[in-house]
Image (spheres, helix red, strand yellow):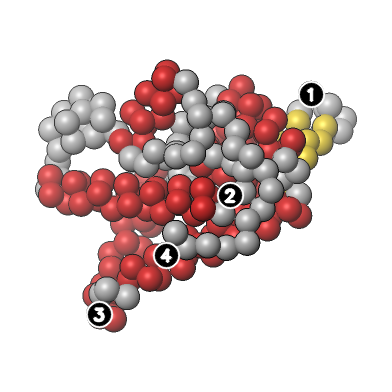
Amino acid sequence: MRSETQSTGGPDPSRDRAFVVSGHVSGHASGPADDATADATLTGVGGEHGTDGAGELTSAPETVTSLLRMTRLLVGIATEAVDELDVGVSLPQFRLLLVLSELGPTPSARVADQLGTAPSSVTRLADHLERVGYVVRRRERPNRSVVRLELTTTGSEVVERVGRRRAAELDRLLTALPPHEQAQLAELVTRFCDRAEHERGDHGSVL
């Protein structure tokens, strides 16, 4: 296992819906119902090919299968980075940190929208993140019923450390491809992401 100076903080049992394809959040306890929900969301197992019973695939099945396989790999890399650095958070909790890193101080309702989850789930995630010193809650003025979440300096450092670990692992894996194939991959992935983000927006897309 690749090592790096580890931070303090123990794992938290809270779980939430994570991204769209497979990747089990290891090293964090959860209940059977939570695991079933998380695994179903992560793997997209609602339909035989992740269509959730909406009908036959309109794209080439091998393309969809390859993308599902790639996403499982990417989620696995993200999970591994969070676990190996021992920063005391689960992958769903880390996703909340990513939202705040990208948006800055944000009302909890908008964080829930970005994560594609319920506000009550964000409250549970933020409870732990506040306890370990990664997030602070602030009341809006004059409407003090609105709670704004904000990264602390330590929380920002966690996001940066995990990001560096993920980038290093991707860089290591990419060396298996010659430069011209890396360029082709970058072009295709960029085109696909641009189109997908245009159609879907940024709802629930943080990882």
Q: Quadrant of residue 54?
A: top left
* Position of residue 94 in the picture relative to residue 140 (left or right): left
In the rendered view, would you say 50 is above or below 67?
above
**Nearer-N-terminus badge (2/3):** 2
Cα separation, mark 4 vs mark 1, equals 42 Å
Q: Position of residue 172 (x, y in %)?
A: 38, 71
Residue that sits furthest to the bottom in the current view = 179
- For disc 2, the neighbor class at 10 Å (few under 14, some 14 to 19, many from 20) is some
Q: Position of residue 184 (x, y in %)?
A: 26, 72
- Mark on residue 169? 4
Cα separation, mark 4 vs mark 2, equals 17 Å
Residue type highlighted by circle 4: Glu
Confirm or deny contact between disc 1 and disc 3 (CB under 8 A): no
* Residue picked out by circle 2: 86
Dot 1: element: loop
Task: Nearest to the eye among marks 4 and 1: give it.
Answer: 4
Cα separation, mark 1 vs mark 3, equals 55 Å
* Residue picked out by circle 3: 178
Residue type highlighted by circle 1: Ser
Cα separation, mark 2 vs mark 3, equals 33 Å
Task: Nearest to the eye among marks 4 and 3: give it.
Answer: 4
**Nearer-N-terminus badge (4/3):** 4
Q: Is residue 119 visible?
A: no
Confirm or deny contact between disc 4 and disc 3 (CB under 8 A): no
Dot 2: element: loop
* Position of residue 192 in the picture relative to residue 150 (left or right): left
- For disc 1, the neighbor class at 10 Å (few under 14, some 14 to 19, many from 20) is few
Residue situated in front as seen by the camera: 10 or 197: 10
Task: Nearest to the eye among marks 1 and 3: give it.
Answer: 3
- Mark on residue 22? none
* Residue picked out by circle 1: 145
**Nearer-N-terminus badge (1/2):** 2
